[in-house]
Image (cartoon, rainbow, N blue to C red):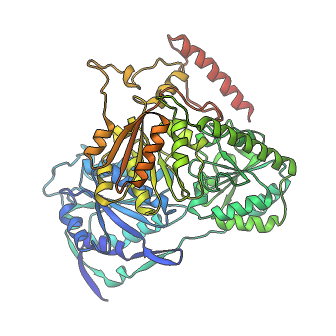
């Protein structure tokens, strides 16, 4: 047997470099690179190995470990999980900074390979710098925190363990049903330890997506249900995009005349003006989609885990016999008491369409869907129209950005009030034009995520919409975007704090407290942050504007710029689009000294009773 003597770190890098994927007929490296912040837990091992492989596995330097993992996750999402990245850190705080990002990937079913350094497997120098010691378990390290947010976790304490660990990691990362973050915890002494690896272990391997057919009996039941349905509705989730089934869905919905509503992850599955597209669904949904969902006698959910924002906390979509869950993961297909239909979205839609032949939903249902969609489009026109206020609403800001966006551009966002406005109001040109992280709703994802999207999509512009609160949490990758020459257009909406949660706080009867800067316990005063000056200090071009007209002019300048451009404007912290939407279950205290809370509790109890009655 031919062998190659390599350190464990060199073996990891060589193996990753050998993995391939095929996209649009072109064979590409599966791993587009490795993000790295080096420290004593990885610089001598993986750092040296990555230096030698920098032509085949590029290494990118970031400023924050959580942010670099967000960028890797966004890259995978933007490529429909067909390509991915790895991330390596030192031990201790560097590693733990990635745990939040691991949860983002886990919730959103996105592949990322995490390679945190770990303590010495040999334990001779213990306790080492940054080591977390468990008083009752000598095998525990800080990296055990990755276990609940990894789809596969392994600690490498011997080089030869990689023979089993690396293929298992790739199996998970490329599996449509099991896809998610993988953590290989690399003991720092083992990274530098050599072993004679079989040469065949590093042979190039092409990873093609598995397209699992549905069980014939499940398929037959779904066909029967669809044929009998008088008021069917499709809910398109992120799985439609990951399965590259958008074109198939468009053809299926058009042929069978079934209206399509979209989740946050699924938005853009159909162009916004497609005849069957009735807009966003759920808590942040359109009036059109939500009215149809309440009255539908059958909901075909495709590639969605049906979280509470989609189901209206199960008051809008309650599940049970009127729900079919088409999903590649049986875990998701069986949720909410649904009729499961386990299979690849594209292949299963093709099979459903062939079995349904020319069957179409009743004309009256089609006419109603078109009428509601047209009415909602008029609402979008109205609430996103430019105004003259110095502090415009979020809706007016995103309306301006949407008008300035071309067909090949992408909008990126993640948390706060903006995702709700975007879900309702943004007009996505088609697949890939709308990139929201709203499974974990992770503040700080936006700018780093935008960088990952830009690395996946070099053409067009990437518009990052971010609130001032999220900007302050994690803005460092503006500097990385400048360093790498990956231009972003970042729009910072400054509403003076955490405006979204301030509104929720008051909606549940609470006093405005600790969210907006004006409501915190400040002994000196509000900070008066100059976001544009801060962005310029990170290397970006930046300016502060007032109102929509100045914003639109600034966006033109940003598009013409040759590097990342940041545009800052003050917005109304209290305004949110009242139109559309559905109930969201946010528990209100049973006991309170505030009248407003007691009134909110009464309303909450009534909402709970209505949910029991069903939509």
Question: Residue 58's spot in the image, x, y percent?
Answer: 31, 68
Of 271 and 245, nearer the camera is 271
Of 153 and 24, nearer the camera is 24
Question: Residue 301's spot in the image, x, y percent?
Answer: 67, 52
Tally the marks. 0
Question: Residue 367's spot in the image, x, y percent?
Answer: 83, 47
Do we see residue 19 in this rendering?
yes
Residue pictured at 25% horizontal, 58% vertical: 117
Residue pictured at 53% horizontal, 18% vertical: 509
Placement of 380 over or under 110, stated as above or below: above
* Quadrant in the picture for the C terminus: top right
Q: Is residue 362 left or right of residue 333?
A: right
Placement of 24 over or under 562, stated as above or below: below
Residue pictured at 31% horizontal, 43% vertical: 535
Q: Quadrant for residue 611, please give it.
A: top right
Do we see residue 102 in this rendering?
no
User: In the displayed image of the protein, which residue is found farthest to the left?
Assistant: 125
Residue pictured at 48% horizontal, 31% vertical: 500
Question: Residue 40's spot in the image, x, y percent?
Answer: 17, 57
Of 304 and 444, nearer the camera is 444
* Quadrant in the picture for the N terminus: bottom left
Q: Is residue 105 left or right of residue 225?
A: left
Placement of 2 over or under 268, stated as above or below: below
Of 516 and 226, nearer the camera is 516
């Amino acid at each position: 047997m031919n062998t190659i003597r390599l350190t464990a770190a060199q073996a990891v890098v060589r193996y990753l470099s050998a993995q391939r994927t095929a996209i649009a007929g072109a064979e590409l490296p599966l791993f587009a690179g490795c993000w790295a912040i080096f420290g004593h837990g990885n610089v001598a091992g993986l750092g040296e190995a990555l230096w030698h492989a920098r032509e085949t596995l590029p290494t990118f330097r970031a400023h924050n470990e959580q942010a670099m993992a967000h960028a890797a996750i966004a890259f995978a999402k933007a490529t429909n999980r067909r390509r991915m990245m790895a991330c390596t850190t030192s031990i201790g705080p560097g590693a733990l900074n990635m745990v939040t990002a691991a949860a983002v990937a886990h919730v959103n079913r996105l592949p990322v390979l995490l390679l945190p350094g770990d303590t010495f497997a040999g334990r001779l120098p213990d306790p080492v710098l940054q080591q977390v010691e468990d008083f009752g378990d000598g095998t525990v390290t800080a990296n055990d925190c990755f276990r609940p947010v990894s789809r596969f976790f392994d600690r490498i304490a011997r080089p030869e363990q990689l023979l089993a660990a690396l293929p298992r990691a790739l199996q998970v990362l490329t599996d449509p049903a099991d896809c998610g973050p993988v953590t290989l915890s690399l003991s720092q002494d083992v990274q530098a330890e050599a072993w004679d690896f079989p040469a065949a272990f590093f042979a190039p391997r092409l990873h093609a997506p598995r397209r699992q057919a549905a069980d014939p009996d499940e398929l037959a039941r779904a066909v029967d249900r669809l044929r009998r349905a008088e008021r069917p509705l499709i809910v398109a989730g992120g799985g439609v995009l990951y399965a590259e089934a958008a074109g198939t869905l468009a053809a299926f919905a058009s042929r069978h005349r079934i209206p399509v509503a979209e989740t946050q992850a699924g938005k853009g599955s159909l162009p916004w003006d497609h005849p069957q597209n009735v807009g966003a669904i759920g808590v942040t949904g359109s009036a059109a989609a939500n009215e149809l969902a309440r009255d539908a006698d059958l909901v075909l959910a495709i590639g969605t885990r049906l979280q509470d924002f989609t189901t209206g906390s199960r008051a809008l979509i309650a599940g049970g016999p009127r729900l079919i869950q088409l999903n590649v993961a049986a875990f998701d297909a069986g949720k909410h008491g649904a009729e499961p239909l386990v299979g690849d979205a594209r292949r299963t839609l093709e099979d459903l369409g062939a079995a349904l032949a020319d069957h179409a939903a009743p004309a009256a249902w089609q006419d109603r869907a078109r009428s509601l969609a047209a009415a909602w489009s008029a609402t979008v026109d109205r609430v996103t129209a430019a105004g003259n206020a110095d502090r415009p609403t979020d809706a007016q800001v995103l309306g301006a950005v949407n008008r300035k966006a071309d067909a090949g551009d992408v909008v990126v966002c993640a948390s706060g009030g903006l995702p709700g406005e975007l879900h309702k109001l943004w007009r996505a040109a088609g697949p890939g034009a709308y990139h929201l992280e709203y499974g974990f709703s992770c503040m700080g994802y936006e700018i780093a995520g935008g960088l990952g999207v830009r690395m996946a999509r070099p053409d067009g512009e990437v518009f990052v919409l971010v609130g001032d609160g999220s900007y302050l949490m994690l803005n460092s990758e503006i500097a990385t975007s400048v360093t790498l020459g990956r231009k972003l257009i970042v729009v910072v909406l400054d509403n003076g704090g955490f405006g979204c949660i301030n509104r929720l706080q008051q909606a549940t009867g609470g006093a405005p407290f600790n969210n907006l800067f004006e409501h915190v316990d400040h002994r000196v005063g509000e900070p008066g942050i100059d976001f544009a000056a801060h962005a310029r200090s990170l290397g970006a071009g930046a300016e502060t504007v007032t109102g929509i007209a100045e914003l639109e002019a600034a966006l033109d300048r940003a598009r013409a710029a040759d590097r990342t451009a940041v545009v800052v404007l003050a917005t109304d912290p209290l305004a949110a689009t009242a139109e559309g939407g559905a109930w969201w279950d946010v528990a209100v205290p049973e006991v309170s000294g505030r009248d407003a809370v007691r009134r909110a509790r009464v309303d909450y109890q009534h909402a709970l009773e209505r949910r029991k009655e069903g939509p």
